[in-house]
Amino acid sequence: MTTNTTPEDRLRAAGLALPPREDPAYDYLPVRRDGNTVYLAGTLGKENGAVQNLGKVGAEIAEAEAARQMKICALQALNWLKEAAGGDLGRITSILQLKCYIACTAEFDGISRIADSATGVFVTAFGEAGKHPRSVLGMMRLPQDAPVMIDLIAGVRD
């Protein structure tokens, strides 16, 4: 990875782009910056104002679709990180922690594989600084009946 490219250049080179930012459906802050730390609320894989395919992985949702939506969650997260960094993703210094939530059946055993889709987006954008500690949780249900969601903590510089 060359040092003169931006996170968005690296995403484009990988065939990824930031989608239009999706605002929260309810009354909460989607992102908060406190000093050099950014806290991101639960982020769904919304497209055109809504999660397009709803339900549980292993029942209504295939693993490949869940992985696709997890990638969208990560790209939406980058939109909020960009806002918290004053419009410049290059000011994000690290992903300090990532939590991935997957609504799934009790029998489904691929939650870490799905979470890898989000991890891949952050590593593509930020290289080594995108590597992070991560928790992956299988859930009975997520907001709006979404199959996947993430939240994270990131470092940012002025």
Image (tube, grey):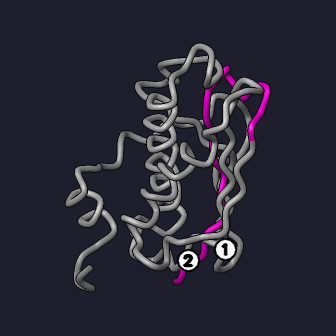
Considering the numbered disc 1 on the image, is that residue within a helix, a strand or a loop?
strand
Q: Which residues are magenta?
A: 138-158
- First in sequence, mark 2 or 1: give its number: 1
In terms of depth relative to the viewer, which is nearer, 156 or 74?
74
Q: Residue at x 53, y 83 (%)?
A: 157
Image position of 5 with respect to 145: above or below: below
Q: Is residue 24 left or right of residue 126?
A: right
Q: Residue at x 43, y 28 (%)?
A: 47
Q: Is residue 31 rendered magenta in the image?
A: no
Which residue type does callout 2 highlight? Val
Marks 2 & 1, CB-CB < 8 Å contact: yes
Which residue type does callout 1 highlight? Thr
Find the distance from the CA under tag 2 to the CA under tag 1: 6 Å
Numbered mark located on residue 37 in the image: 1
Numbered mark located on residue 156 in the image: 2
Q: Is residue 39 left or right of residue 62?
A: right
In terms of depth relative to the viewer, which is nearer, 82 or 115?
115
Quarter of the image where one finds residue 9: bottom left
Q: Is residue 158 left or right of residue 13?
A: right
